Amino acid sequence: MEAKIKKIAVFTSGGDSPGMNAAIRSVVRTCAYMKIECVGIYRGYEGMIEGDFLPMNARSVNHIINKGGTILKSARCEEFRTKEGRQKAYDQLKSEGVDAMVVIGGDGSFTGALLFNEEYNIPVIGIPGTIDNDIFGTRYTLGFDTAINTAMEVIDKIRDTASSHHRLFFVEVMGRDVGHIALNAGVGAGAEEILIPEENLGLERLLESLKKSKLTGKSSSIVVVAEGDTTTGKNVFQLKEYVEQHLPIYDVRVCVLGHMQRGGSPTCFDRVLASRMGVKAVEALLDGKTNLMVGILDDDIAFTPISEAIKGKTKINKELIRVSDIMST
Ligand code: ADP
């Protein structure tokens, strides 16, 4: 029989995302509700190795549900990739009396957690925190909804100025290997075209579409490009040059949204998601589960082995591509 869990550690690791604070709050409050101890670890695996711990109770997480970023900070830690680094982390956790942990992060953080569990058998549950929505086993990752709303609101503003000057804007949004942000923010903001790694639109079709936009009397055009899109072989700045060469009627500008997409107060959707995931993460540990990621599928909380979550690929919503095509008529 597994030993009873008395103290859970929670930490945020890797790329941050809005909603991480709401998830920390949920884990801490669930521990308080279940009458077990909770300790926060600063700066992910870096703080774990250094023993940078913060005992937390229900009051430690007052007024953070609405805050972007992460009060526990996040970091990337090379030392944790080494056996010696992980040994130090284990020693720190043992001397702190930690029996189990909740990691809030992306697939890199999950990979580290899994390895750590194999070596030291500390039960772990993962909460997927990344704006990219690229983790298998959950329909939504924490922060994605906030990020698409941030991107959409900015694109709305860009459209105002684009239309005043009859300009074409290439707007680059985040998404290293996936086009979820581009597709959703693009449809939401009424982009004329959306370039994502999963679909090859082709440069010819892009030019055709832009020509058509001009002919049908559109006063501005927005093309949303996922940062990881390599299907055209061009980045946003090269796309600008290409279109200027082939369609001189267009006055083209580029806007790279960058890290603003990672910040800001989380949407209601992300706060609710974080609250649900945090409760389930703690409950799962107390039920003796380990090496699982909490996700949401068909609006129900679902667990996926972390090993599958880090290997599996998410699928783009093809219906959105069709909707986008029809809307750009
Ligand atoms: P994310 O969790 O957002 O995907 P990273 O890929 O940067 O972010 O991973 C965060 C941290 O997880 C890394 O800095 C490292 O400390 C740890 N990590 C990632 N991959 C491994 C691995 N293969 N072995 C051990 N630790 C890892």
Image (cartoon, rainbow, N blue to C red):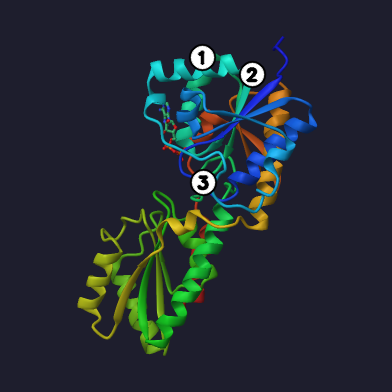
Residue 129 position in % (x across, y down): 55, 43
Residue 290 position in % (x across, y down): 62, 23
Q: Which residue is mark 1?
A: 91
The quarter of the picture where the N terminus appears is top right
Relative to 244, residue 166 above or below = below
Per the image, label 1 sits on a secondary structure element best described as helix
Q: Nearer the viewer, mark 3 or mark 2?
A: 2
Q: Which residue is mark 3?
A: 130
Q: Earlier in the sequence, mark 3 or mark 2?
A: 2
Q: Is residue 326 left or right of residue 67?
A: left
Relative to 107, residue 89 above or below = above
Q: Residue at x 70, y 19 (%)?
A: 5
Residue 103 position in % (x across, y down): 56, 32
Q: Earlier in the sequence, mark 1 or mark 2?
A: 1
Q: Nearer the viewer, mark 1 or mark 2?
A: 1
Per the image, label 3 sits on a secondary structure element best described as loop
Nearest to the observer: residue 151 or residue 306: 151
User: Is there any visible trace of residue 319 in the rendered image?
Assistant: no
Q: Residue at x 51, y 50 (%)?
A: 131
Q: Which residue is mark 2?
A: 99
Badge 1 amino acid: Asp
Q: CA distance from mark 3 to mark 1?
A: 29 Å
Q: CA distance from mark 1 to mark 2?
A: 12 Å
Badge 3 amino acid: Thr
Q: Is residue 247 left or right of residue 138?
A: left
Ligand 1 within 8 Å, label 3 CB: yes
User: Is there any visible trace of residue 8 in the rendered image?
Assistant: yes
Nearest to the observer: residue 53 or residue 136: 53
Q: CA distance from mark 3 to mark 2?
A: 26 Å
Crowd tier of the residue under label 2, counting other residues whose Cα lies within 10 Å: few below 14, some 14–19, many 20 or above? many
